[in-house]
């Protein structure tokens, strides 16, 4: 990592507030209906059916947990539903990867007439080249499908015009996605995701169970498959079996919007970061006294209390610099003429300077 890049990274850390992660947490405990594979004993049976060689495998004891103070059966319902859902996404992703590697849609992608990214690009690069508005549309549709899943196919109280399902943590068969019948009856027609033409509604239970087990296995294999091709494209030689077919990709597969966003003040992330930074000012000032106590106790190495102001609010830009300074010192040959202590002081001073300039720019008055 270059010295200047590390400086800018640290300055960004000074002015960006990171939001907490949110997780769905259902309400109260409820009785769990008697459905297949909703108990730990059922999981052991399912494991034998899906993979007799491996059998039941739960090294970290997830099936023994009680997420969000729910019952063990509710937790298993959540885990099974999540696995099946991710398996379906992975199957779609793997097929999409294979198709995109050789062809793309021939019609325009935008109203302006722009075509879809060429198949000469890797599937990952095709995603990067897709317009941001199109990406948002994809995320929006996925979000709406997720909401419908959480609602169980109910727009409100079910009056008999739909087949609303219980929540998958409260009795629904894991992996069963609700139909759009109530939406069709209340708003407009939408084809169901599963069996839209009713071709398999009379399927025998034995056949249905066999196909459900097959789906689990296919989903697990697809999850391994899609990450194998992504790893092979991103890190040369990481998957020897794919060495001859991998298509080099120098982006970050774990940052799907990395090509669209930055921390500049005129971007979406820049605006969100500014709001987050403003919020962090309040929290930072409330903890200022405690920060000083830590420094006095030798728990924090700071840059000497450098600070900047935004209106009547003042924020401390000092953070622990020892670790990044040590990294920059050991990976750079340009500053070996200085001993480490001198280098660290210089590093801290430049980091605070860059942070101050960015902070001032973010909170400078907007010109008409």
Image (cartoon, helix red, strand yellow):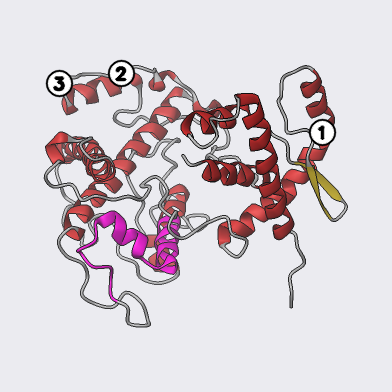
| Location of mark 2 (residue) | 41
| Label 1 packing within 10 angstroms: few (<14), some (14-19), many (20+) | few
Of the pair 265 and 176, the residue shown nearer to us: 265
Tell me, yes or no, whether the highlighted magenta stretch contains residue 135. Answer: yes
Give the image location of residue 217, x and y in percent: 19, 35
The answer to the question of whether label 1 and label 3 lie on touching residues, with beta carbons closer than 8 A, is no
The answer to the question of whether label 2 and label 1 lie on touching residues, with beta carbons closer than 8 A, is no
Q: Quadrant of the C terminus?
A: bottom right
Name the element at disc 1.
Answer: helix
Residue located 14% across and 61% down the image: 102
| Segment tinted magenta in the rendering | 115-144
User: First in sequence: mark 2 or mark 1?
Assistant: 2
Magenta-drawn stretch, dominant element (helix, strand or loop):
helix
Name the element at disc 3.
Answer: loop
**Marks 3, 2: nearer the viewer:** 3
Residue 220 relative to residue 130: left or right: left
Distance (Cα) linking label 1 and label 3: 59 Å
Give the image location of residue 208, x and y in percent: 17, 41
Of the pair 270 and 336, the residue shown nearer to us: 336
| Location of mark 3 (residue) | 52
Asked where in the image residue 131 lies, by quadrant, the reply is bottom left
Residue located 40% across and 22% down the image: 62
| Label 3 packing within 10 angstroms: few (<14), some (14-19), many (20+) | few
Of the pair 43 and 240, the residue shown nearer to us: 240
Residue positioned most to the front: 337
Of the pair 211 and 58, the residue shown nearer to us: 58
User: First in sequence: mark 1 or mark 3?
Assistant: 3
Give the image location of residue 192, x and y in percent: 30, 60
| Location of mark 1 (residue) | 288
Distance (Cα) linking label 2 and label 1: 53 Å
Tell me, yes or no, whether the highlighted magenta stretch contains residue 247. Answer: no
Q: Is residue 321 above or below residue 86?
A: above
């Amino acid at each position: 990592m270059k010295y200047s890049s590390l400086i800018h990274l640290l300055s960004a850390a000074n002015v960006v507030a990171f939001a907490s992660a949110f997780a769905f947490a259902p309400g109260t405990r409820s009785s769990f209906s008697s459905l297949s594979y909703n108990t730990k004993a059922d999981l052991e049976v399912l494991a034998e059916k899906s993979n007799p060689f491996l059998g039941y495998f739960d090294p970290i004891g997830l099936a023994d947990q009680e997420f969000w103070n729910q019952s063990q059966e509710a937790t298993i319902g959540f885990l099974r539903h999540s696995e099946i859902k991710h398996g379906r996404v992975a199957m779609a992703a793997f097929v999409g990867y294979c198709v995109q590697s050789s062809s793309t849609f021939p019609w325009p992608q935008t109203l302006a007439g722009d075509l879809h990214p060429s198949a000469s690009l890797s599937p990952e690069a095709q995603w990067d080249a897709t317009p941001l508005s199109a990406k948002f549309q994809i995320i929006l549709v996925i979000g709406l499908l997720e909401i419908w899943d959480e609602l169980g196919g109910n727009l409100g109280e079910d009056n008999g015009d739909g087949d609303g399902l219980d929540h998958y943590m409260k009795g629904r068969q894991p992996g069963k996605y609700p139909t759009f019948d109530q939406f069709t009856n209340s708003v407009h027609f939408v084809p169901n995701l599963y069996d839209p033409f009713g071709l398999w509604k009379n399927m025998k239970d034995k056949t249905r169970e066999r196909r459900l087990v097959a789906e689990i296995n296919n989903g697990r294999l697809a999850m391994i498959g899609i990450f194998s091709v992504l790893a092979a494209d991103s890190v040369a030689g990481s998957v020897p079996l794919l060495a001859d077919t991998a298509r080099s990709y120098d982006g970050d597969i774990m940052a799907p919007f990395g090509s669209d966003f930055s921390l500049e003040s005129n971007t979406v992330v820049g605006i969100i970061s500014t709001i987050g930074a403003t919020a962090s000012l309040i929290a930072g000032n409330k903890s200022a006294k405690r920060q000083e106590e830590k420094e006095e106790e030798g728990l924090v190495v700071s840059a000497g209390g450098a600070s900047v102001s935004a209106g009547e609010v003042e924020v401390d830009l000092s953070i622990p610099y020892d670790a990044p300074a040590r990294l920059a010192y050991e990976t750079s040959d340009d500053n070996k003429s200085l001993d480490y202590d001198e280098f660290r002081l210089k590093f801290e001073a430049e980091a605070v300077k860059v942070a101050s300039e960015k902070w001032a720019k973010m909170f400078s008055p907007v010109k008409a």
